Every structure is written in structure tokens, then in C-alpha cells.
Amino acid sequence: MNQTKFWLLLTYVITAFTCFSSLYYFKYLPFSKSLSSLEHLRLDYFRQGGVWDDSYLDSPQAIAKNRLNLNAWGGFHEIKIDNFFKEDKLSLSYDVILSENSYIYLYLDRSNEENAIGIRLSLNKEYPSIFFRRNGKGKFLEKKALQVEGKLGRNKFEAQFNNPNIQININDSKALSFSSKEHFEDELLFAWGGSSEVTPVSVDNIKILNGAGQLIYENDFSLKFEHFEGIDIAVVIGIMLFIIVSTQLIKDEKLKLTASICFLLFFIQSGLLYRFYLSAEYIEGEEDGVTKAQIRTMMKNKIDKFEFESARNTQKIFFYGGSKTVGVGAREKEETWVKLLEAKESLKNWRLYNFGTISADSSDFIYLHERLKHHQPELIVILSGVNDHDSKEYFQNMRKLTQGSPIQKFLLIQESTYLDDFSAIEQKNTYRNFNKLKPICEFDNVECLRVDDKLYKSKESLYDSGILWVEWIHSNSYGQEVLFEIVADVLDRKVRAL
């Protein structure tokens, strides 16, 4: 084989590889994943209690712009180093990038989840900068104002651990100094949390030094090329060789056209790569949703699981809803808001049935109610709004549900979601949905409870009595407890009247 034929054959092979990888890339994005340090991120960090753990850690947006972006995948993530440090002297430093109205939790130690300590660095008037201790559920045990505030853009955070003293500097100014011998008895564990999609925050340039000044941990979240796959190498070589030899050797016009299309696709991919890594812009992707058939099957299984015969003469309360009614986000089942209601003394003579089903919306509640109404519960409690994306259809379904059983009593509860800008409360999807229910709320058999008014507008400042969320939709165990407290008083009044 002469040299010209060899190069022509090689060009054919490389072009074929490039075409294949281009098509494969659009579906699975192997090129962008292998360029990233996502594998490194997965090994060093893990989510705490969230629902979309894999989605966040698999998303290139998590380390876009060469930093750890807590706002990726809807925001409010908690990430901690999967490495404990047993040192009497330790120096910790990293950069925190704040945007307007944002804040971030900077944990100084999470080795004991029942007494985690940290600070909140903030540009948000609703969530000011504080030092805090919190319990395992998320409730603040202590909080006090910091002496310094954060600034827009990059902030320098430094912590000096010198048993038993801890000193915190922010932007080279002393922010806090205290003794905490208790937290030197065990190993130290560092973490970050907070942010939302509209108020992004990031962490960068993490360094941990021991007492001797030796570097024991470092991460700058830069793109790494150590995870190249063979298909990626083929793509890169293909580009180089194609530019060099194609204009001289490829005479076939059809092959030229095919090769041109393949490499056009590749350059489009490069644009996507820029958006994923450099802009940190959220790109709505195809998600693996739960189908209606799966939801209805789960509902049927729940109905089959419950024993109704023994409770024939017992007063009953049915709960309808989605994953928030299931209690997703709580550490354990006993800490979900419905389970807390079951344990309430005033409800000890009532039987509570939780038919909450992941991803269920108002149309599914109708399906469920048709199969349950003959059991004649004294009250039906519905927590809803997040999974309904059409307010008009939501209203129609809820009206059909409540007015199809005019003698049935209903308590309709608004689902609340994470919020860091209180001026936007009335723009929330769940708030708008609940506004549509006003005519329904006026019926004699219906009462409505707007959780946002109790959570974000109350004098008790419930929104800042602890960390309430595991991500922007689901509440942690303390968030479940707060919801229980909001609902419990209303439910007590309802059952007394029945």
C-alpha cells in the first residue's frame, strides 16, 4: 500500500470514528464528562440527604468555570469532603464567590451531625451572616451575628484550628474567634451548603495544611485530562488529521460532505462544552420522569397495603400528595411530618393513612379518591402544587375532587419550596397555583392553608430557625418538623369540630 492510500484509509477511519463519537456525544456527553474532574469530585465529595445526588455529581455544571457550583441542578446542595482530619493544628482556606442576594453555609466541622458548627456568609438581608450550631435535623441550637460581612464576587475564607481555639478570617479581617474543645475530640469534617439557581455561589481553591505547614488536601476544580477515553482521543486526532490531509487527499465529494457534517457536529459540541463548563448556565435536559402508569401502580400498591377492615369504626384521616407527602428528605420515616402527626396525643384515637406518592399531581388524586372514597374518611388532607404545571387544570381537578364529594371534608395545604428572595413569593408556581383555589376554599367542606404565609411571613421567623431543605423542593427532618407545627394546630381544630 502506497503512502497516499494509507493516509486516505486512515482519514476514512478517523472520519468514521468522529461521526460515531459526535452522534454518541449528543446522547451521552462522554467527551465533556471525561474532560472534567467529575470522577475526582465523586470520590472526594458526597451529597447530604438530597434527592438528586447522582444528577448533581454527574452534571458538568457542578464544576463549571473551574469551581464547585452549589447552584447547579436547582441549587441548595450540601457537599462535604469525604475525608476526616485528625489534627490539633490545622489551616483551612478557600475562596467563596458570592452573587447578589446570595449566601453560603461554611461548615467548620460536621463530624458530629448532632452538633455541627459553621458560619453563614451572606449578601442576603433575609439570611444575614451568622455563626451557628445546628442539630442533626437542621435546627439551629445557637446563632449569633458575625463581625464582618461578605462582598460581591470573590471572598477569601481562612480558618485556623489550634486546639481548642478556632479563629476565622474573612477577606483578611477577623470574623470570629472561639474555643471548642469538644470539636477536637473527634476528627474534623468540612463542608459547604446553600445557594439557589437564581443566586449562585461557588467554592474554589481549597487548601488544608497541617500544623507543620504541609499540604494535606487541595482542590481547585480545574478541568482534568486524566480520564480520557479512547473515543475522545479518536475525536481529537480526527480533527487534527482531517485538517491536515483532507483537502489534499479526499477527492470523493460525498465523503467530503459527510466529513464536513461530522466535524460541524463536533464544533457544535464544542459550543455546548463552553456552555456547560465556562458559563455555568443551567441547561434544561431530558429527565427520567415517573410515568402515569408507574404513579398509578404505586398508588394501587399503597391501597392494597393498608388494612381498612379493622378500622371500620375508627375515625380516619387520608393524606394525598406527592413526594413531600411521602416525606422525602427526612433522615428517617419517623421524622416525616405525617408520622409526627400520627404521634400527636390529640390524634391518638384517629387512624392516619398516608397515600402520598412520588410525582403525583392533582389528576392522580382524583384517580386515588375514586378508589378510596367508599371508606368514608372524616377528613382528607392534600398537600399539593409542586407537580401541577398548569394552574387552570390544577383548579379544575381540585374542584372536581372536592365538589364531587360535597359531604367530604378537605384540608388543602400549599406545598412550599425553597426561597431566598421573599419579594418573589407571589411569583412562585405553588403560590400561583394556590391562588387559583380561592373559589374552592370558600366552600363549606373545604379549608385552605397557605404554608408560605406561615413560613416566610411569620413573626417567628421560621424560615431562619434552622436549615430546612435538602434541595429546593424537599425538606430535611427539621423542615418536616416545621411543616408539622404549621399543620398541627389547624388539624387539631378540624378534628375537634368533626
Image: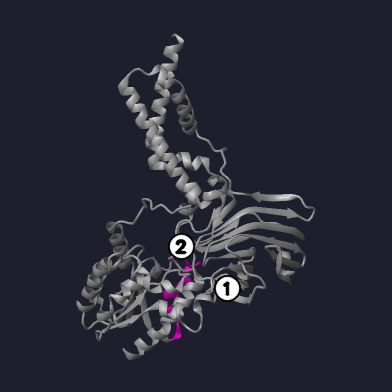
* Magenta span includes 331: yes
Taking the image as shown, residue 470 lies to the left or right of residue 398, namely right
Q: Position of residue 371 (x, y in %)?
A: 24, 70
Are the residues tagged 2 and 1 within 8 Å (C-beta)?
no
Question: Which residue, given by chain and number where applicable, does mark 1 sit on?
Answer: 128
Quarter residue 148 falls in: bottom right
* Magenta span includes 377: no
Q: Is residue 416 visible?
A: yes
Residue occupying the far top of the picture: 2
| Residue 198 - label | 2
Q: Is residue 489 above or below residue 178?
A: below
Q: Position of residue 321 (x, y in %)?
A: 34, 70
Residue occupying the far right of the picture: 212
Magenta residues? 328-345
Q: SS of the residue at dot 2?
A: loop
Circle 1: residue type: Pro
Q: Position of residue 420 (x, y in %)?
A: 48, 69
Residue occupying the far bottom of the picture: 497
**Which comes sooner in the sequence, label 2 or label 1?**
1
Q: Residue at x 25, y 80 (%)?
A: 440
Q: CA distance from mark 2 to mark 1?
A: 18 Å
Q: Residue at x 46, y 69 (%)?
A: 475
